[in-house]
Amino acid sequence: MQSGRIIKALSGFYHVESEEKIYQCRARGKFRKNDQTPLVGDFCEFSIENEVEGYILKLLPRKNALVRPPICNVDQALLVFSAKEPDLNTLLLNRFLILIEHLHIEPLICISKMDLAVQKDVHQLMFPYEAAGYRVYYVSAQENQGIEEIKHLFKKKVTVITGQSGVGKSSLLNALDIHLNIETNEISKALGRGKHTTRHVELLKMYDGYVADTPGFSSLELTMEPIELAHSYHDFEELSQLCKFRGCLHDSEPYCAVKEAVTDERISQERYEDYLSFLKETKALKEKKYG
């Protein structure tokens, strides 16, 4: 029996990397009986039937798991948002940050297509995020701008690259490694959005780490408790230690450190208002679930 990491899942087969070799494996039927599905990123134990084929026998414990896209044991997420075509959507960015930080995955914000934008305007828009401690990178795959600056991020990490359609994720990957030759599509001018070009999840070796090229998040529903939401943003969680009441949702409660930070402009009003809309959403989902 050998151990390895699943780096690709396609058509019922799992490609397992072990000691610099790739084995094509199927999962034993017991996983279906136990309602368990192997995911890309899983560490597993497997048997070898011949030189390159085998069966997955056991999945090792995961530190986190995403449902859509199906991947686990992720260290960080590179959230790609374009400066233009489509325009930078901070509401969607804030939702992504909630989802990623809730799973204790470190978010890295990457603003693509900087060659199409007024740089001053984009930097001003992203200032509240940098002030909150997020790492923000500005790139242009077309002009090779900022590409060298992000290569070091992947070392010894499993990184998910995600974002809305048409922001240039595949172009960014191709700029990082010209040998990948990942399929890309031009933005649809009529619809104002792009087409998904990635159809499966796969870990690609890159700069002494792994980068996950995924079809993107097919669900952005905030399936968490309101109190979990209140602690999802790292800066909100830190400030919540100073709130007067335990379990503060940073909404109508008095003596709330997060609301004080908004008043003092240490947290942007826009981020806070987006948070309140997400809070309302999670409360509605909870009422719907429990009646």
Image (spheres, rainbow, N blue to C red):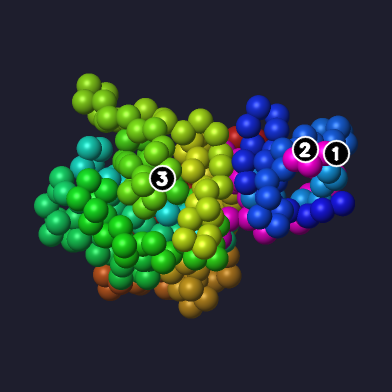
Q: Earlier in the sequence, mark 2 or mark 3?
A: 2
Q: Position of residue 209 (x, y in %)?
A: 53, 60
Mark 1 residue type: Glu
Distance from disc 2 to disc 3, alpha carbons, whole Å, reads 27 Å
Q: Residue at x 70, y 33 (%)?
A: 13
Can you identify the residue that label 2 sits on? 53
Q: Position of residue 15 (x, y in %)?
A: 67, 41
Q: Earlier in the sequence, mark 3 or mark 1?
A: 1
Q: Residue at x 25, y 64 (%)?
A: 127
Residue count near mark 3 (Cα–Cα under 10 Å), binned few <14, some 14–19, many ≥20: few
Q: Does the stretch in magenta take in 203?
A: no
Q: Residue at x 41, y 37 (%)?
A: 182
- Write down the region rendered in magenta: 50-75
Inspect this view and state whether residue 7 appears.
Answer: yes
Residue toward you, 288 or 101: 101
Above or below, comparing residue 18 to residue 289 in the picture: below
Q: Which mark is residue 179?
A: 3
Tell how many labels.
Answer: 3
Spot the residue most to the front: 51
Describe residue 249's horizontal placement relative to residue 260 as left or right.
right
Can you identify the residue that label 1 sits on? 49
Does the CB distance between marks 2 and 3 fall below 8 Å? no
